[in-house]
Amino acid sequence: MKSIESQRADSRKKTCVIFPGALGDFICLLPALEILARSAAVDVFARSEFAEIAPAGVAVASLERPEISQLFRSESVDHPQVQRFFRAYDAIYSWLASRETELILRLEVISGGRAQVFPFRPADAQVHQADYYLICLRHLAGSSAQPIVTLQAEAILWADSFRARHSLEHSRVLAVAPGSGAREKNWPAHFFRAVIRWWRQEIGGMVLLILGPVEQERGGSELLENECVVARGLRLAQTAALLARSDLYLGNDSGISHLAAALGVRTLALFGPSDARQWAPRGEKVNVLRRAIDCSPCTEPTMKDCRHRACLTELHPQEIIAMLVNLPEVVTLTS
């Protein structure tokens, strides 16, 4: 990949965004990035793999860049290279280490007052994360907080080849992502299996099982793998292209669910301990399914210590199947 400097050949204003979030967070940030890119060349320092889904006019490089790492060191204030780096930008927006007062002060001094630092999460948990990023930029009014991901041409060709190799071309495909960033947010694997078997037997379709690095490391997907075409170890652009070719998507509160929604795929997102008001995937074809119990949603410490997980274990496969049966897409498939 080209360096971020080599991607910038124009003389427009330059904006720096420092963003430590995971995939779902980044997708929620997309509407804000699109607004920034209308008036400036935008450099985002985040996870480098996000470059594959960034909007036009936005370049993504690793958050591990030395100049950013230097912000955690007191001597960075007098470091010429760090000063040159940040003062090359007309505006800097950061959601990194917002509770570290010394780091914030260093960034303000080094940038010559160009930096604005925001808390990573809104104080009001009822504010959706995508809306919150727009609020930070004071662009909520008249702006759409609907993330949109555009596919790469190379990834589309790769996905077509993958589908041909696995005989998915002429099948109704249900994409399933059974993992998430936290095991406690995951619907039970045997519940996923029940829906997968229904899809295969009653709809006559095939199931694409999407496994990311976290799921491969944790294990536990063996229960599902024999029932599905398995896609593992994919680049983000490849995952997006496969999702976009699927008829339906089923997953937890996860980054892949946000990705499916942003691609315009009919998405069923299963929510348990996390708050859908803040984290539901945004999209025109999104259904959020949850079991309303007194203790849900809950805080992360409570989620980690929960022994019953009733918000997920009492959300039964039959309820998911009943909703699937009534979706326009599935009605069309079976008619």
Image (tube, rainbow, N blue to C red):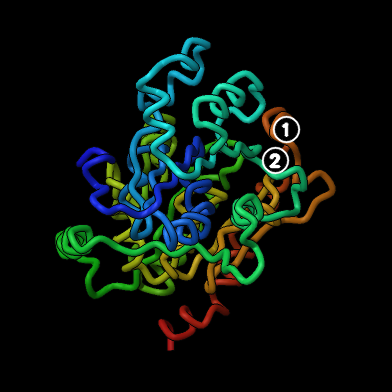
* Residues packed near mark 1 inside 10 Å, few (<14), some (14 to 19) or many (20 plus): few
Farthest residue in the top direction?
75
Q: Residue at x 51, y 45 (%)?
A: 189
Q: What amino acid type is highlighted by mark number 1?
A: Cys
The residue that mark 2 highlights is: 309
Is 128 placed above or below 115 here? below
**Looking at the picture, how far across and down is residue 60, in whole percent?**
35, 44
**Looking at the picture, how far across and down is residue 100, in whole percent?**
64, 22
**Looking at the picture, how far across and down is residue 126, in whole percent?**
75, 53
Farthest residue in the right direction?
294
* Residue 197 shows up from this direction: no
* Residue 153 shows up from this direction: yes
Q: Residue at x 39, y 29 (%)?
A: 217
Farthest residue in the bottom direction?
335
Left or right of residue 274: residue 69: left
Q: Residue at x 23, y 50 (%)?
A: 9
Q: Quadrant of the N terminus?
A: top left
Left or right of residue 272: residue 171: left
**Looking at the picture, how far across and down is residue 235, in whole percent?**
28, 46
In the figure, residue 196 lies in which quadrant? bottom left
The residue that mark 1 highlights is: 306
Front residue of 56 and 67:
67
- Contact check, label 2 and label 1, Cβ < 8 Å: yes
Is 291 placed above or below 198 here? above
Is 155 placed above or below 15 here? below
Is 26 placed above or below 46 here? below
Front residue of 79 and 68:
79
